[in-house]
Image (cartoon, helix red, strand yellow):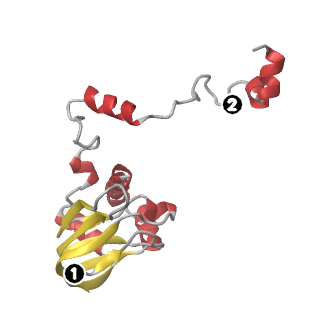
Amino acid sequence: MNELSRTAAAPWAARGPVFSQPGLARPVAWATPRDVDRRRASHARGQLGKPLVPTSVASPRLGDELFARLLTYGTPQETHWGDVLFRPGDEDVDLIVVDRGSVEVVRTETADVPAATVAAVDAGGFVGELNLLTGQNVYLLCRVREGGTVYRVSPERLRQLMANDVELSDIVFRALIARR
């Protein structure tokens, strides 16, 4: 392709890099499922059926002080076995912090795939995904396995947490990204 036809096809290409250092922006090919399997196989922990992200990042255990700080951002709610805290398609879902009892996150049944429990979260853990910050609808179901108390942290309060508590926001943000 000559310079004239390249400029006509992609006018931005003629300008060259727009970053302060050449070569910072390179196109990245989309990953296929086979690429992901190869990547898993190339890492010691990345075996088929094993997560790419360590559980300690996706499901962190907060110390007593950090957990107490997280609770201050939420509103308590008593729960009973079978209560649904959110379901696929819900908007404005809260971060669910489990103080007493336990909850489970379930991928609901589709025409091709049976329902399956994605995660079980006991007291001291929290349920949420990156959609809390992006505003996307949820695609999983969260229901109570053992009654107790959860704290609901609204998206607005979560943004306040992110702005005000660097240590806690770093842990929560990394977990939300890892779960995606």
Observer able to see residue 163: no
Q: Name the residue carrying label 1.
A: 149
Q: Measured from the top left, where is residue 32 in percent x and y? A: 43, 35
* Quadrant in the picture for the N terminus: top right
Rendered position, 164 above or below 78: above
Looking at the image, residue 100 sits to the left or right of residue 23; the answer is: left
Looking at the image, residue 13 sits to the left or right of residue 84; the answer is: right
* Number of the label disc, if any, that sits on residue 121: none
The kind of residue tagged 1 is Thr
In front: label 1 or label 2? 1
The residue under the point 40% across, 66% down is: 161
The kind of residue tagged 2 is Val
Q: Measured from the top left, where is residue 8 in percent x and y? A: 83, 26
Q: Name the residue carrying label 2.
A: 18
Q: Are marks 1 and 2 in contact (CB under 8 Å)?
A: no
1 or 2: tag closer to the N-terminus:
2
Seen from the viewer's position, the closer of residues 108 and 140 is: 108
The residue under the point 38% across, 57% down is: 166
Q: CA distance from mark 1 to mark 2?
A: 52 Å
Seen from the viewer's position, the closer of residues 139 and 61 is: 139
The residue under the point 38% across, 72% down is: 87
Q: Measured from the top left, where is residue 122 in percent x and y? A: 17, 67
Neighbour tally class for label 1: few under 14, some 14-19, many 20 plus, Cα within 10 Å:
some
